[in-house]
Image: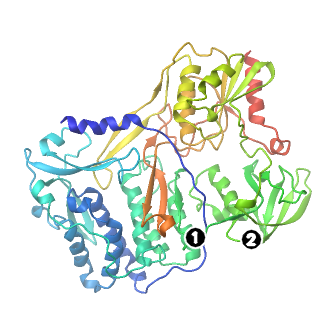
Amino acid sequence: MEKYKKYARTSLALAIMSIITPSVSANHLLQNEQGYEEIVPELRAFSELAQQVRYFYPSNAVANSDWDSFLRDSFKVLRDTPSEQRVDKGIELIQAIAPYVQRNVIHLPSVENDESVNVWIQSGASTNHIYFRDLTTGTFQELTQFPYFTQQTYFASTYQGQDIYIPLYLPIDSALLGTAYQAGNPYNLVTNMTGTETCMAAVSSMWAEIQHFWPYFAHVDVNWSQTHLPLFNACIGARNEFEYKVNEQFSLLGDNHVWINYPEEIVPFKHYKLPFTLSYIDEKALVVNRTDFLSLQVELGDELISIDGQTIDYWLDYYKGRTLKAGLTEKEQSLNLLTRYTDSRLVNMVFRKSSGEEYGVTSATVHYKVTGPYKGQGVVPHYSELVRYHENGVAQLMAYNVTVNNLPDVKRLLEKASAIVIDFRHYPTSFQGWKQLFAWLLSTEAKSGTLDFRYQMMPDQTKKFDYTFRQTITPEGAGVNIPLVALSSRSSISQNEHALMFLQDANIPILGVPTAGINGDIVYSHKFGGYQQGGISYIYTGMSARQTNGEALIGVGVLPDMYAPRTAKSIENQEDNQLIQGISYLKKQL
């Protein structure tokens, strides 16, 4: 029994992180062999059954099969099968790998208490960073003593109106039956995402990972089952709509970690940019950074009101629900997409100054390698120092720059501080760095919000086990014993939010705006070699997180005690108004 306890201990070494990659866009048409339009609902049903078997049927053949290639090839076989034989053919294809997928429950092998059986133990769709997926063996009686193994011996599913039974435990001898499916491309299909079958297999497998392993369905109002068919249909439509049709479905999750990298064959990379960046501030698209490629008439803080004859409101509406992001993060991403292009071209724009004066500018897009340095603070100013002093001995501590190695320098630099602004508006450099910093700063023990490391047992997520825990930072001494305030921003995401919750639990006030609203370690996944090899790559959140008070974090974020957004005036004047307000607050505490 000791060997199974290692799975509970695995979750004690979690690290929270987020990696975001650039977006891309699309043109031209997907390859589309005729004959798929009418049978897409049948292919969806087949794929849903196959994905249940893929993740929950406990056999060596299932574990060793190339399921994405199996789906791709099976779609071709099913398309070429007469309609009246298609259901039987689908079951036959699956039974070649998993012979005990049965239409009658009496045909399932019996499972005795003292019998050695196979079962999946899994916290993710694959062994991936902190997540694992293992086919394990033990007696049924032994295994079911642990909370991460179901008591049920099978799962009742349906396929095209027929009852189907999938064993969740298999006696060892039974688990050896079936033949693993290996990729050999017997039908000479296109193996990148421009191929209809490859595309459908890829997006369906992406859908299935979310369906079976995404942990936030209890927090987000989304009917994920209804998104599967539109994903299939995206593969038989116009290529210039593909990216947005897929993004529309994954945007419904409201998971600000979600990112999808498409292959250039379908979505050409956007290597060209307008020579400025925008941010959505005071309900305006404001220039927050610019390069020397831009007309000197355009100044930081100017509002972009139209581009190529269309207003900013038009573009925000155009991208709405298509950016993979939620909340204000969605508008930020929309403005980011608006400034990126696949080629060099002239773009006509109209700007407005704070005085109300409007003027037109024509600018060329510039390749990202030659844009040159940006000038401006951006929506969230970034400071390269560790510590910067302000009036009355108030120190600004750039917590996002702290590492284990430079922590001694931080402590030395803060020796004369009368109060500290803990600037945590950017993603941190070092997880261990800020944790050790907090252990030195804080005078009381502080806990994170709750985190759930989930074990999935059933295809419908009705049976799961959450290993719920809170991380603790214990003070290493008496703390600094001076006034503190922390800064948050809309860019504070994931590990930022995790850190801010420790400060929140320690009753250190937070000044700024609600954070991005997503925490929990992420999953990286790739289909058909990933986007660099003609496949597709994507990221989603694999572990759920809550606020320190137990309420939902996703879609809400860490809420500040003192609301202090960036303003149009502060951008125009190049003033860090959040820092100014933080310093003002601390001066009153002295």
Which of pointers 2 and 1 lies earlier in the amino acid sequence?
1
Look at 38% across and 60% down and name the residue there: 208
Task: Find numbered disc 2 in the image and state the secondary structure of the residue it sits on.
Answer: loop
Mark 2 residue crowding within 10 angstroms, few (<14) / some (14–19) / many (20+): some
Left or right of residue 109: residue 244: right
Look at 55% across and 29% down and name the residue there: 404
Task: Find numbered disc 1 in the image and state the secondary structure of the residue it sits on.
Answer: loop
From where the camera sits, is residue 253 visible?
A: yes
Q: Position of residue 109 (x, y in %)?
A: 10, 58
Q: Position of residue 462 (x, y in %)?
A: 31, 49
**Could you give the CA–CA distance between mark 2 and mark 1, rounded to whole angstroms?**
17 Å
Look at 64% across and 40% down and name the residue there: 426
Q: The disc labelled 1 sits on which kind of residue? A: Val
Look at 55% across and 78% down and name the residue there: 238
Left or right of residue 457: residue 574: right
Q: Can you say whether 30 is above or below 388 in the image?
A: below
